[in-house]
Amino acid sequence: GNSVTQMEGPVTLSEEAFLTINCTYTATGYPSLFWYVQYPGEGLQLLLKATKADDKGSNKGFEATYRKETTSFHLEKGSVQVSDSAVYFCALGRNNFNKFYFGSGTKLNVKP
Amino acid sequence: GAGVSQSPSNKVTEKGKDVELRCDPISGHTALYWYRQRLGQGLEFLIYFQGNSAPDKSGLPSDRFSAERTGESVSTLTIQRTQQEDSAVYLCASSLDRASSYNEQFFGPGTRLTVL
């Protein structure tokens, strides 16, 4: 089957710290992988994506590399800001799939 | 431009009552999804509409749940005889076509349902 597991939160960091949020997946076939972000009071937004093994998705200073050998898609940022405080969701889907499979979300709190 | 909107933002109801949740997708988006998010859990797929095709209802948890969509417009999710286990945030998303790595899903802010 298909599923996504991501690290539990909350994660609390000081501004300018390095961020890693772990995400691993189980999938049949060749999925695409995504990170969505939900800022307080807003809907989920696509943050970045990778469609095949070894692809790196990047956006707003965040990066994630699709690692087929470890079935992982960890989210990283070199220097977080207070404005990055949000809930981050890892997800997988396949081209032309009706459904995406989402992780449970990881809340990030960044303190000034 | 306008994003996906949902109403109400919050709904408190008594066990056994029926509730109706509304989703207004982005204009021109043919695909519409409903998800449920229980506290501390991931998003759970409920139902998918694509244009005038028969919806994919495979995620609906029981026959108390139903959803409608007329054409490519508004969708309503109805929960009959609500139970406390139905308490969750219900999220709606739309996309230009069937969701894929090339067609991003745009999410609404959700409706928080509390069943007392």
Image (spheres, rainbow, N blue to C red):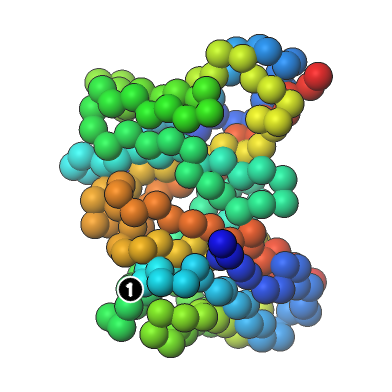
Work out whether B78 lies above or below B109. below
Classify residue B10 by image quadrant: bottom right
Residue A105 appears in view: no
Chain letter belonging to callout 1 = B
Classify residue A17 by image quadrant: top right
In the rendered image, residue A104, in percent from the top left (x then y), is placed at: 54, 43
Q: Amino acid at mark 1?
A: Gln
Residue at the left extreme? A29
In the image, B84: left or right of B31? right
Q: Residue at x 63, y 82 (%)?
A: B20
Rendered-image quadrant of the N terminus of chain B: bottom right
Q: Residue at x 60, y 35 (%)?
A: A106
Work out whether B33 lies above or below A51. below
Q: Which residue is mark 1?
A: B50
Rendered-image quadrant of the C terminus of chain B: bottom right
Work out whether A28 lies above or below A72. below
- Tell me if mark 1 has few (under 14), some (14-19) or many (20+) residues whose alpha carbon lies within 10 angstroms of its own: many
In the rendered image, residue A41, in percent from the top left (x then y), is placed at: 72, 51
In the rendered image, residue B29, in percent from the top left (x then y), is placed at: 40, 69
In the rendered image, residue A67, in percent from the top left (x then y), is placed at: 30, 23
> Which one is in front, A64 or B82?
A64
> Which one is in front, B16 or A92?
A92
> Which one is in front, B74 or A94?
B74
In the image, A5: left or right of B1? left
